[in-house]
Image (cartoon, rainbow, N blue to C red):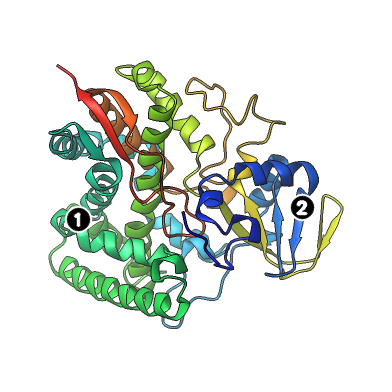
């Protein structure tokens, strides 16, 4: 594995090996520096569960508001109420657990198609054969855009959330690629929205346009909602599915969850805790604050290490063990407070279906290599490839 000199990471995590296994550093920080100032990057880090939880719940003191890029509409991810509320309200109901469950038959159909092709031999790459496509196809179906364009959707998403490692550390080149991907996605959705305005269909884009166009949301804000759903709706779920297979195969647990929906659900939750697809998120204090005895000035970013909070022994028994039957499991992989992940129920459903379809067809699943590379993204956690070997069942 190579070294990365990317300053988006704290110095102790600038090697690929440490990015895949940051948990020893998290443990050291929880014990010796649970609130840590990084003078190189002028940012504070917090590592304990209780502190991370408190900050993420307090949206009035700890803001998510960021200055949008030029010509970019505001995003619900990087805004506070009332803007956040106005942007989230049009789609929140469609991602409620009961509504999401209605998508299960279509998700299972797509998962079956992908898995059947992937397990034709005795080896597969979980990322490229399954995990990177099912979430993209699912969100495309929900939005009502053609799933056959999934390669383009996935390329846009991966580029927009990537870190400088995607371009060998060249930040200028990364910015150019991200801007180009953003323009292509914007033009695409402008065209789709124009068509839906003329000929509505039974899909989320048509529903939002019919209810909100010309109302409290601008055309750019509506387009921004769809763009965010396309990107956020697949990158983290790709990592969740991949990380789940990684955890279960590495710990020889596939057989313990096969055919048992409750066991599979608990295993997904344990994956979310043990190898959280999002390792950290940031907030900006709106006023001077004191955090565990440390004075933090207003406007100085605070990075909440979710991946560390999910390994805090004050909350989780034997936190560095993957225990697929862990219950209760109050992890915060999807965040807390008003920014709790909009797509949490959908991500859980997709992961359970993907794993169920895969494990119904294979057994003796084992990692083909332990030489894994982290994904090209600073806050995302996963691997670029996950080759596994297996035996076909029945």
Q: Is residue 353 left or right of residue 275?
A: left
- Front label number (1 vs 2): 2
Residue closer to the observer: 387 or 286: 387
Residue displayed at 30% across by 45% down: 127
Q: Position of residue 31 (x, y in %)?
A: 77, 41
The single residue placed furthest to the bottom in the displayed view is 70
**In which quarter of the view is residue 105 placed?**
top left
**Residue at coordinates 55% horizontally, 64% vertically from top-left?**
82
Residue pointed to by mark 2: 35
The answer to whether residue 226 is visible is no
* Image quadrant where residue 212 sits: bottom left
Q: Which residue is mark 1?
A: 144
Q: Residue at x 23, y 38 (%)?
A: 124
Drawn side of residue 20 relative to residue 173, left or right: right
Q: Residue at x 30, y 65 (%)?
A: 156
Mark 2 residue element: strand
Q: Residue 68, relative to residue 378: is it above or below?
A: below
Whether pointer 1 and pointer 2 mark residues with C-beta atoms closer than 8 Å, the reply is no
Where 55 sits versus 392, above or below? Answer: below
On screen, residue 52 versus residue 333, left or right, reads right
Identify the element where label 1 is drawn.
Answer: loop
């Amino acid at each position: 594995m190579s070294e990365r000199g990317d300053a988006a990471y704290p110095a102790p995590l600038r090697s690929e090996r440490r990015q895949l296994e940051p948990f020893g550093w998290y443990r050291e920080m929880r014990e010796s520096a649970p609130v840590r100032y990084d003078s190189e990057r002028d940012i504070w880090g917090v590592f304990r569960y209780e502190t991370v939880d408190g900050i993420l719940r307090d949206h009035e003191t700890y803001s998510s508001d960021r200055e949008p890029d030029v010509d970019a509409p505001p995003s619900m991810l990087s805004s506070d109420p009332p803007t956040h509320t106005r942007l989230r309200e049009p789609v929140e109901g469609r991602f409620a657990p009961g509504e999401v469950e209605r998508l299960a038959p279509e998700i299972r159909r797509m998962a079956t198609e992908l898995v059947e092709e992937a397990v034709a031999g005795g080896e597969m790459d979980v990322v490229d054969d399954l995990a990177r496509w099912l979430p993209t196809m699912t969100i495309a179906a929900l939005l009502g855009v053609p799933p056959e364009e999934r390669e383009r959707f996935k390329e846009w998403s991966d580029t927009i959330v990537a870190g400088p490692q995607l371009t060998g550390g060249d930040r200028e080149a990364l910015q150019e690629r991200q801007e180009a991907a953003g323009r292509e996605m914007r033009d695409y959705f402008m065209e789709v929205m124009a068509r839906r305005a003329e000929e509505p269909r039974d899909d989320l884009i048509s529903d939002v346009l019919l209810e909100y166009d010309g109302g409290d949301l601008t055309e750019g804000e509506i387009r921004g909602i769809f763009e965010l759903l396309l990107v956020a709706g697949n990158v983290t779920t790709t990592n969740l599915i991949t990380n789940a297979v990684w955890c279960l195969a590495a710990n020889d647990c596939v057989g313990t969850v096969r055919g048992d929906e409750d066991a599979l659900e608990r295993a997904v939750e344990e994956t979310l805790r043990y190898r959280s697809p999002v390792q950290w998120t940031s907030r900006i204090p709106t006023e001077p604050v004191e955090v565990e005895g440390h004075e933090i000035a207003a406007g100085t970013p605070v990075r909440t290490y979710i991946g560390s909070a999910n390994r805090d022994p004050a909350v989780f028994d034997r936190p560095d063990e993957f225990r697929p039957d862990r219950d209760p499991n109050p992890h915060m992989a999807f965040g807390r407070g008003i920014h709790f992940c909009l797509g949490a129920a959908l991500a859980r459903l997709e992961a359970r279906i993907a794993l169920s379809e895969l494990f119904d067809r294979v057994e003796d699943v084992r990692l083909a290599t332990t030489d894994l590379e982290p994904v090209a993204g600073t806050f995302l956690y996963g691997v670029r490839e996950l080759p596994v070997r297996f035996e076909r069942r029945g």
